[in-house]
Amino acid sequence: MKFLEGSMKQELMKIFVFAVAVFTVPVFFKGGYIMNVLVFVGIYTILAVALNLLLGLAGQISLGQAAFFGLGAYISGVLTATHAANPWLAMVIAVIAVGIIAFVIGFPILKLKGHYLAMATLGMGIIVYIIFNETIDITGGPSGLPGIPNLSICGIIFNSDMKNYYLVWSFAIVTILLSINLSASRIGRALRAIHDSEVAARILGVNVRLLKAQIFTISGIFSALAGSLYAHTVQFISPASFGFNVSIELLTMVIIGGLGSIYGSFLGAAILTLLPELFRTFQDYDIVVYGIVLIVMTMFMPGGLVRGIPLLARSLLAKVKSGPPTERRV
Amino acid sequence: MLKIESITKIFGGLKALQGVSFSIAAGEITGIIGPNGAGKTTLFNIVTGIYDPTSGKVYYGGKDITGFAPEKLARLGMVRTFQGIELFGQMTVLENVMVGLHTKSQSGIIVSALKLPGHLREERHIRERAISWLEFAGIAELAHMKAANLPFGKGRLLEIARAMAIEPQIILLDEPAAGLNSRETSDLAMLIKRIKDSGITVALVEHDMELVMGICSHIVVLNLGHKLAEGTPRQIQEDEKVIMAYLGEG
């Protein structure tokens, strides 16, 4: 696990450098389409980090993360577009409501393990997706919910890609910081213990059921935050953005980046958001591509890119130093 | 300290334990022995809340604790180790023991995420306590090694150090000498004696007769789910029924 490598001071240094890098990026692009894509990288980074807390840290799978993402978006969207609530207030309500929902679902559901938990969370995702589609009076059904207002602060309305970039990434960096803190804490340690041996953790007095429900809730809260940001930046939401394939996409991001590595989740989110933009032809086959990527990654780079690339670089370097490989004799 | 009262456990058609009763005295080392399949580990699993008994009661300091969950028992001061050692393999040796101090600290999920000052102080304290438990078990030099990479014998010691970190009143060791060589076993005997000397009650299930006879003051013998005998090591060694059970009736 990457969580505790290096002291906390180094961790703070890392996040500072990361934040500076993120906030200087717009200087090079001066707007344009790429900024729009980078806003989505930010939103998916929050989502991938949220799933990673659950999957990488505590070892609990969720194939229904898109449900929390969607609930956050719809609660925020409906409150503002239909009921003219203040967008910030709507965001707070969305996050709290999803937190409560996640806890109520998580407490019983996380008694399940492995495949059963995967199926139960999958079911949760599907049910929520159906609700978005069928409650047409509230959500607008498959044709979506338009007219969601932008967020604004002190007269600045976040209505351009450039402004949204700063907005979304501010939240993304706070999410990363909180997640790193949590991972390195007593709670993070207990969660990693649960990941390795649930029975041993219980014997030592760790309240496994409560902690699992809590991390599921935190994961849901961050996902709802991402959903609310999505609703207010895109200004239009429809069920298709919160379907099963989104949950799988998030899973792929976390695994590509590296289970348990917070920055790996960013990397995974960046790759999976930027690549489809470059290879537009894959569009209809994206789920197939994700499937192949998942298989290849788990077979050849189970630690994800964050751990796999340094390993690969080291072995390549070693090969270069020792000259070309000699032919194997039988 | 611990009173086991007519415990019966039936798995499907198999009677693993039938009406077993005995007591474990405070401040002593009690050994539970018996041939394979006698029901020793099942008994430990019932006492420590992993299984519920089919019938019977477990009392701990006079309190009925039958069916209490392991995490609740930990808070009451009961801890155990496992036959096949259950370490947190992906964590370091030190972190393993730090998890043992989980109940000795409070920071919740929000305090931890915001890293408030009280939390940092608590972390430092946990770290220091964990190191002193590693020293107690004699494995402080391995603190930063990944637990999964430990040799088996050291893993055993780590599991005991981690259990001690919860500052238990009673520790139950399930075959602590299994898989250890003779030198490691004698180190283990010393460690168990040190635990007893610090005022903690010890119960152990064990096959290594030399170890059991050497350190236990009281021994309970189980055979095929029944209690066969109990007494001092000398009484047990001279007991006809025990000799029969171990050597067979041929």
Image: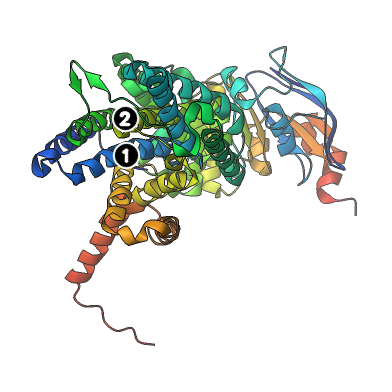
In the image, farthest residue toward the right? B250
Q: Pointer 1 indicates a residue of which chain?
A: A
Disc 1 marks a residue whose amino acid type is Thr
- Which quadrant of the rendered structure holds the N terminus of chain A? top left
How many angstroms separate mark 1 from mark 2 (CA)? 9 Å
Q: Position of residue A241 (x, y in %)?
A: 42, 41
Q: Position of residue A233 (x, y in %)?
A: 29, 32
Measured as percent of width and height from the top left, residue B74 is found at 58, 22
State the residue at coordinates (19%, 37%): A18
The quarter of the displayed image where residue A23 is located: top left
Q: Can you identify the residue that label 2 sits on?
A: A175
Q: Residues within 10 Å of mark 1 (few under 14, many from 20)?
A: many
x and y percentages locating residue A186 in the rendered image = 40, 26
Is residue A228 or residue B170 the one in the foreground? Answer: A228
Q: Is residue A206 visible?
A: no
* A205 relative to A133, above or below: above
Which residue occupies the foreground of this view, A108 or A221? A221
Residue type, label 2:
Thr
Name the image quarter holding the C terminus of chain A: bottom left
* Marker count (numbered): 2
The residue closer to the viewer here, A139 or B120, is: A139
- Of the numbered discs in the image, which one, if any, rests on residue A45? 1
Badge 1 marks a residue whose secondary structure is helix
Assess disc 2: are there few (<14), some (14-19) or many (≥20) residues with their C-alpha within 10 Å of its C-alpha.
many
Q: Identify the subunit bearing mark 2.
A: A
Name the residue rendered at 40%, 32% in the picture: A223
